[in-house]
Amino acid sequence: MDWASDMGFPSWRGSSTAIVGYIVGLRELVEALFSYAKTEGPVQVEALFDEYNLNIHVTYEGAPMEFPYSPPTHDELMTDHSSLARMSGFMIRLIAEKVTATANGNRCTVSIHITC
């Protein structure tokens, strides 16, 4: 993974599946936050990695994301704009082993755990 060392990360020893999950999950989350008006401001990303775990913490000001266990129905996707954000949350839940979302006033944090 040359891009990781180019960004200043040490050599990643995790499985390629975990790293791809990290990339896909983080990208889906950030796109959903901005595409579905969950935030307008900066998004802070913290990634913690060891040989066995990859934990991502994303903090932002705005509306909390939902991470449902089942996808929105076809009808919901066709008629309810907010269902698109829920679909993103569902897809992130499929990638991660654990997802938590907390809100303290307008400050939201999403934590994603992936085992390497």
Image (cartoon, helix red, strand yellow):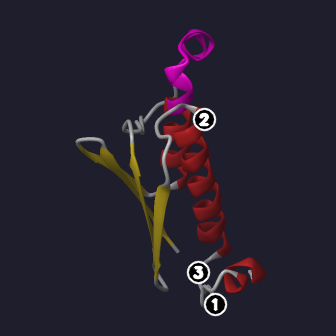
Residue 32 placement, left or right of 98: right
Q: Which residue is mark 2?
A: 35
Q: Residue type at mark 1? A: Ser
> Is residue 76 in the magenta section?
yes
- Look at discs 2 and 3 and give the one toward the viewer: 2
Q: Position of residue 52 (x, y in %)?
A: 46, 80
Of the two numbered discs 3 and 1 in the rendering, the one whose residue sits closer to the viewer: 1
Residue wearing tag 1: 11
Q: Are marks 3 and 1 in contact (CB under 8 Å)?
A: no
Position of residue 76 measured from the top left corner of the image (x, y, whole percent): 54, 14
Work out how far the residue at label 1 is from the one at label 2, CA to CA, in angstroms. 32 Å
Q: Nearer the viewer, residue 42 or 25?
A: 42
The stretch of residues the image draws in magenta is 73-85
Which amino acid, by three-letter code, is at mark 3? Gly
Q: Which mark is residue 60?
A: none
Helix, strand or loop at label 3? It is loop
Front position among marks 1 and 2: 2
- What residue sits right under mark 3 in the picture? 14
